[in-house]
Image: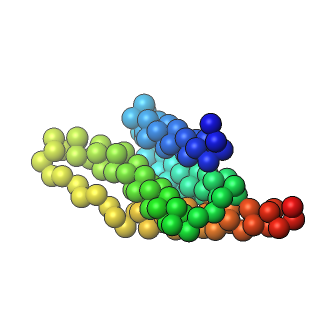
Amino acid sequence: MKKKSKAGLIYFLIWVLTVGAFWLGLGRDAMGYSLLAFYGVLPLAGLLCPIFIAIRRFNLLGSIFGSLLIGFSYSAAQYLTFSLANMIMISFERINPFSVEAMIGGAATAFIGFLIGGIIGAVKRARG
């Protein structure tokens, strides 16, 4: 398995564990969970995994697509935790809309990671 796919797989596993932890009871402390998950773990993973992907090969179009994918997953994590729990509690009387705005933060963080990884990879290749 290539390093590129390992970093993507690692991000996916972190994402699944973060969402799963909410439903396994960690979400009872909503403030602590949201600080840890949405301001710590997911942004850090969304920054570091693209760095490792882009170190080997930087591709602008792939970076844009990867950034949008990570941004979507960041927004989906918020939707599948707090929004879904809210809808369940009110018996789906009101369906919460998917937050496209949350994608911006996740996508921006990932794109910065791709740029940093591209720069590191270019410096490594230039040195030989």
Q: Where is residue 93 drawn, in percent x and y?
A: 12, 48
Q: Is residue 68 left or right of residue 113?
A: left
Quadrant including the C terminus: bottom right
What residue is shown at x 58% (from left), y 44% (from top)?
5
Does 120 sit left or right of 70 as displayed? right
Q: Is residue 102 above or below residue 3?
A: below
Seen from this angle, which residue lies furthest right? 127
Residue situated furthest left in the rendering:
93
Q: Residue 21: horizontal and vertical position, in percent?
A: 47, 36
Q: Residue at x 56, y 55 (%)?
A: 46
Judged left or right of residue 121, residue 91 is: left
Tell me how the rendering is colored.
rainbow
- Can you see residue 53? yes
Q: Position of residue 58 (x, y in %)?
A: 63, 63
Q: Residue at x 36, y 45 (%)?
A: 81
Q: Position of residue 13 (x, y in %)?
A: 52, 38
